[in-house]
Image (tube, rainbow, N blue to C red):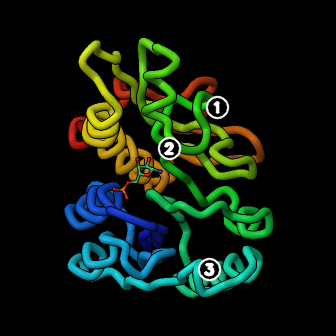
């Protein structure tokens, strides 16, 4: 069986990207790293991609006056990678409907909140302001609405009195994101997780609630 081709879209640091590339390299994600596209030329994730031997390219949003033109250029660059799976990993541009329709069912995103809570930016600050007892991150299919779309897996932890914005950001990244994203992509690459119409299927059954940290396989913990 040929491995699915995985493309990753980034804009910044690329810590999620690194975890994904590591899991591809050691075989935990049974996919080919088809390429990495950044919306910024200075993204720290680009050298990570090159170091892993994955094609790394830039489609800079600043080169396009209008969003449709940027979306079209990005879609063209992405199509050239012939991806079966598209992972948005800290990709900070809002994508238009045409783009989303084109990659629907094969595109997922990671978001640093317990969706549907706190779509958009500054999630850690908003959790603290609301006095929430729990926080976490979610991997969801990209279907239209910003940070909407069915959630496949969500990892959570209890907020502690000493947590500030910075600490929460690090806990979400290290304890949740870097585990659930490679795991979700592994499931997708194996064909165990997929979107059928509006419904999420996991190992042939409809997922009625997101998977949790309890479902992580040992190699992703
Ligand atoms: C992550 O917190 C992700 O959830 C959000 O942007 C951040 C990306 O960080 N969408 P990195 O580029 O993976 O280091």
Q: Which residue is mark 3?
A: 74
SS label for mark 1: strand
What's the residue at 35%, 28% (across, down)?
A: 213
Q: Which residue is mark 2?
A: 111
As drawn, is 47 to the left or to the right of 7?
left
Disc 2 crowd rating (10 Å Cα; few below 14, some 14-19, many 20+) is many
Quarter of the figure with residue 80: bottom right
Residue 72, position in %: x, y? 71, 81
Q: Say if 196 sits above or below 59 in the image.
A: above
**How far separated are the C-alphas under marks 1 and 3?**
32 Å
Residue 40, position in %: x, y? 46, 76
**How far separated are the C-alphas under marks 2 and 1?**
22 Å
What's the residue at 43%, 33% (across, down)?
A: 124
Residue 74, position in %: x, y? 62, 80
Q: Which residue is mark 1?
A: 206
Q: Looking at the rendering, in which quadrant would you find the C terminus?
A: top left
SS label for mark 2: strand
Query: Could you tell me if residue 217 is visible in this image?
Result: no
Depth check, front residue: 161 or 102 = 161
Disc 1 crowd rating (10 Å Cα; few below 14, some 14-19, many 20+) is some
Q: Earlier in the sequence, mark 2 or mark 1?
A: 2
As drawn, is 75 to the left or to the right of 86?
right
What's the residue at 29%, 65% (across, down)?
A: 21
Q: Say if 154 sits above or below 122 in the image.
A: above
SS label for mark 3: helix
Q: Earlier in the sequence, mark 1 or mark 3?
A: 3
Q: Nearer the viewer, mark 2 or mark 1?
A: 2
Residue 39, position in %: x, y? 51, 75
């Amino acid at each position: 069986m040929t491995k699915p081709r995985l493309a990753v879209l980034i804009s910044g640091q690329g810590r999620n990207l690194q975890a994904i590339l590591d899991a591809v390299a050691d075989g935990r994600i049974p996919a080919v790293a088809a390429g990495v596209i950044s919306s910024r030329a200075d993204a720290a994730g680009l050298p990570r991609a090159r170091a892993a031997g994955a094609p790394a390219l830039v489609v800079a949003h600043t080169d396009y006056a209008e969003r449709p033109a940027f979306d079209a250029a990005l879609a063209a660059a992405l199509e050239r990678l012939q991806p079966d799976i598209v992972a948005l990993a800290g990709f900070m541009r809002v994508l238009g409907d045409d783009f989303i329709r084109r990659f629907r069912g094969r595109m997922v995103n990671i978001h640093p909140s317990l969706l549907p809570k706190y779509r958009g930016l500054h999630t850690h600050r908003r959790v603290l302001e609301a006095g929430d007892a729990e926080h976490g991150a979610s991997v969801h299919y990209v279907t239209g609405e910003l940070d909407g779309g069915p959630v496949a897996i969500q990892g959570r932890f209890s907020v502690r009195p000493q947590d500030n914005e910075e600490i929460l950001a690090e806990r979400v990244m290290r304890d949740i994101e870097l585990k659930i994203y490679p795991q979700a992509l592994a499931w997708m690459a194996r064909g165990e997780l997929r979107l059928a119409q509006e419904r999420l299927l996991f190992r042939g059954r409809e997922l009625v609630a997101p998977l949790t940290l309890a479902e992580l396989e040992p190699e992703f913990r």
